[in-house]
Image (spheres, helix red, strand yellow):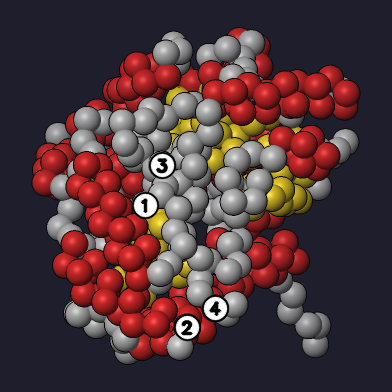
């Protein structure tokens, strides 16, 4: 009898996700995540959803004709609403035809990769960073190439990016505001990155695309503004997810937008490639109800001011307890330095006391902890004394 085999690429994807999946399995198997647990692990909702989100889904789920749930790639009103909003926010004229509605940010990133890279092409991505970059790149038959951010500041290390680009490089990923450090990259850094990519494209005789992963574009603090990478480099594909602004990551809705400064012929080819990427990836378009609801969801957002107050309170409390914690400029996360070398052991001690966080090594941040601010204020109040006891205990 022959031996059954599976895709070696999927085995490589499994290896990329090994630490995350192992952590998730431990969480699911643990008994500590009960009704009184303080959950700071993922950017998951801990409070009831926005009423406007619920109302929009209910309103647009009610069928008005027999074809209401039939096949459709894109809802035109959704594309127009996303393009209008994007144009206002970025000061560029994005065309509705250049905005592909996707199944969340995951779907937008996957569509960009599948549309652009060939088997074996390299994709540079930031480390630390979102834990699924390597897996999604491998899933698209690419080769992930992590490039470390500048230590402590977490700025783009432009020299390191330039050195990582080789003849097989097809795409570079930039994530701003950056998960999990909260860094918003200034225009000067993005402009210099554009110069690096333009020079490398000329040197290697092919366009190197920039994938701007920007799901936290509206979750910024202290009166700051998000700075979109498409304003610096014409060959930019921008990925966005409504899961952050609506705090509803389980409802998969996002988009992938082509930079309007890209030559029309190149955009036309990319439009078709993105469409076929979504078709070939299992008809991966966002569901029709969510697409119809998108124009109503565009103006909705979680209370960022309340999130900022929570950030300030937690930063103050953790620093008072003795933690070294930077103040993020955006996103959902705090990344205090772990007071001991084994952040997994420290996270396990906190979990035993009912406070659940993510070890930083899962996000490429060994020696740090990742704390999600989507926990409730009540969880914060219960958790801060536990954080204080934990650091006293290990420093005794």
Residue 324 in percent (x, y) is at 46, 62
Q: Secondary structure at mark 4?
A: loop
Does residue 175 sit above or below 325 in this rendering?
above
On the picture, is 332 further left or further right than 34? right
Give the mark nearer the N terminus: 3 vs 2: 3
Give the mark nearer the N terminus: 4 vs 1: 1
Residue 310: tell me if it is visible.
yes
Mark 3 to mark 2 CA distance (whole Å): 30 Å
Which disc is residue 395 wearing?
2
Mark 2 to mark 1 CA distance (whole Å): 28 Å
Choose mark 3 or mark 4, whichever is in front: 4
Task: Tell me the residue that label 4 is attached to.
Answer: 340
Which disc is residue 332 wearing?
1
Mark 3 packing: few (<14 Cα in 10 Å), some, or many (20+)? many
Disc 3 to disc 2: CB gap under 8 Å: no
Residue located 41% across and 87% down the image = 393
Quarter residue 69 falls in: top left
Quarter residue 63 falls in: top left
Q: Secondary structure at mark 3?
A: loop
Give the mark nearer the N terminus: 4 vs 2: 4
Q: Nearer the viewer, residue 67 or 198?
A: 198
Which disc is residue 329 wearing?
3
Mark 3 to mark 4 CA distance (whole Å): 26 Å
Mark 1 packing: few (<14 Cα in 10 Å), some, or many (20+)? many
Residue located 49% across and 42% down the image = 183
Choose mark 3 or mark 2, whichever is in front: 2
Disc 2 to disc 1: CB gap under 8 Å: no
């Amino acid at each position: 009898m022959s031996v059954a085999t599976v895709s070696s690429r999927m085995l490589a994807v499994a290896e990329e996700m090994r630490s995350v999946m192992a952590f998730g399995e431990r969480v699911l198997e643990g008994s500590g995540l009960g009704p009184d647990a303080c959950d700071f692990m993922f950017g998951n909702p801990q409070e009831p959803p926005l009423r406007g989100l619920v109302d929009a889904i209910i309103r647009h789920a009610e069928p008005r004709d027999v074809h209401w749930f039939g096949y459709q790639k894109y809802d035109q009103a959704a594309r127009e609403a996303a393009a209008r909003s994007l144009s206002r926010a970025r000061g560029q004229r994005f065309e509705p035809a250049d905005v592909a509605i996707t199944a969340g940010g995951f779907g937008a990133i996957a569509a960009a990769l599948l549309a652009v890279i060939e088997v074996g092409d390299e994709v540079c991505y930031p480390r630390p960073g979102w834990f699924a970059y390597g897996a999604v790149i491998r899933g698209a038959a690419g080769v992930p190439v992590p490039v470390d951010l500048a230590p402590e500041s977490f700025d783009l290390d432009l020299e390191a990016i330039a050195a990582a680009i080789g003849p097989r490089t097809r795409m570079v990923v930039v994530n701003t505001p950056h998960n999990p450090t909260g860094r918003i990259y200034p225009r000067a850094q993005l402009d210099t990155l554009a110069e690096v990519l333009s020079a490398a494209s000329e040197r290697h005789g092919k366009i190197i695309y920039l994938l701007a992963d920007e799901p936290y574009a509206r979750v910024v603090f202290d009166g700051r503004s998000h700075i979109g990478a498409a304003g610096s480099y014409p060959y930019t594909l921008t990925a966005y997810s409504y899961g952050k602004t609506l705090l509803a990551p389980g409802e998969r809705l996002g988009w992938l937008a082509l930079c309007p400064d890209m030559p029309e012929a190149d955009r036309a080819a990319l439009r078709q490639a993105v469409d076929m990427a979504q078709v070939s990836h299992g008809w991966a378009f966002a569901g029709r109800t969510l697409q119809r609801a998108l124009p109503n969801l565009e103006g909705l957002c979680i209370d960022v001011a309340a999130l900022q107050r929570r950030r300030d309170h937690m930063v103050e409390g953790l620093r008072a307890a003795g933690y070294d914690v930077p103040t993020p400029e955006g996103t959902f996360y705090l990344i205090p330095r772990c007071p001991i070398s084994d952040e997994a052991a420290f996270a396990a001690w906190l979990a035993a006391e009912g406070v659940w966080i993510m070890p930083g090594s899962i996000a490429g941040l060994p020696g740090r902890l990742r704390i999600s601010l989507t926990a409730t204020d009540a969880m914060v109040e219960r958790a801060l004394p536990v954080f204080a006891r934990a650091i006293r205990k290990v420093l005794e």
